[in-house]
Image: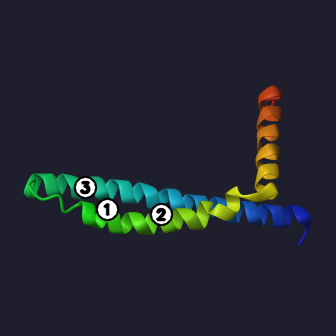
Amino acid sequence: MSSDQELEARARKRVEELKGFYSHAMIYLLVNLGLMALNLLTSPNYFWFVWPMLGWGIGLAVHAFSVFGAGRFSGRDWEERKVREFMEQERRRENPPSQ
């Protein structure tokens, strides 16, 4: 496998990880908003919706850590990746693709 193919495979894997997390977060938000509305309509004196929100929130936090975990934000490699990423963004801003 060539270097470009390896880079593309890793990039696609990362995109899939991000898509999975963002989908999970959106579903979490929508379902818990629905549970909150149901709770407030049916039994506004007891806020039971916080229990599933808390339990699922722990699962979402674990998912976030697996996608964005401490290893991705620590060390010299992370700093170098971010520097290259910001440099590339600046290059694109300065030299937009011609149409």
Task: Check whether the beta carbons of the residues at disc 2 and disc 1 lie within 8 A of each other.
Answer: no
Q: Is residue 15 above or below residue 88?
A: below
Q: Amino acid at mark 3?
A: Gly
Residue at far front of view: 75
Q: Which residue is mark 3?
A: 34
The residues tagged by marks 3 and 1 sit, at their Cα atoms, a distance apart of 11 Å
Indicate which label's residue lies in the foreground, 3 or 2.
2
Task: Check whether the beta carbons of the residues at disc 3 and disc 2 lie within 8 A of each other.
Answer: no
Residue at far right of view: 2
Q: Amino acid at mark 1?
A: Met
Q: Residues within 10 Å of mark 2 (few under 14, many from 20)?
A: few
* Helix, strand or loop for disc 3: helix
Q: Find residue 11 and report its horizontal and vertical position in percent.
A: 73, 60
Q: Which residue is mark 2?
A: 61
Q: Find residue 81 and report its horizontal and vertical position in percent.
A: 79, 51
> At 80% across and 44% down in the image, what residue appears?
83
Please tell me how many numbered marks the rendered image carries: 3
* Helix, strand or loop for disc 1: helix
Q: Quadrant of residue 51?
A: bottom left
> At 82% across and 50% down in the image, what residue appears?
80
Q: Find residue 15 and report its horizontal and vertical position in percent.
A: 65, 59
Q: Is residue 37 left or right of residue 73?
A: left
* Helix, strand or loop for disc 2: helix
Q: Amino acid at mark 2?
A: Ala
Q: Which residue is mark 1?
A: 53
User: Which one is in front, 70 or 93?
Assistant: 70
Q: Is residue 69 above or below residue 92?
A: below
The residues tagged by marks 3 and 2 sit, at their Cα atoms, a distance apart of 20 Å
Q: Is residue 23 left or right of residue 67?
A: left
Q: Residues within 10 Å of mark 3 (few under 14, many from 20)?
A: few
Q: Is residue 60 left or right of residue 66?
A: left
Indicate which label's residue lies in the foreground, 3 or 1.
1
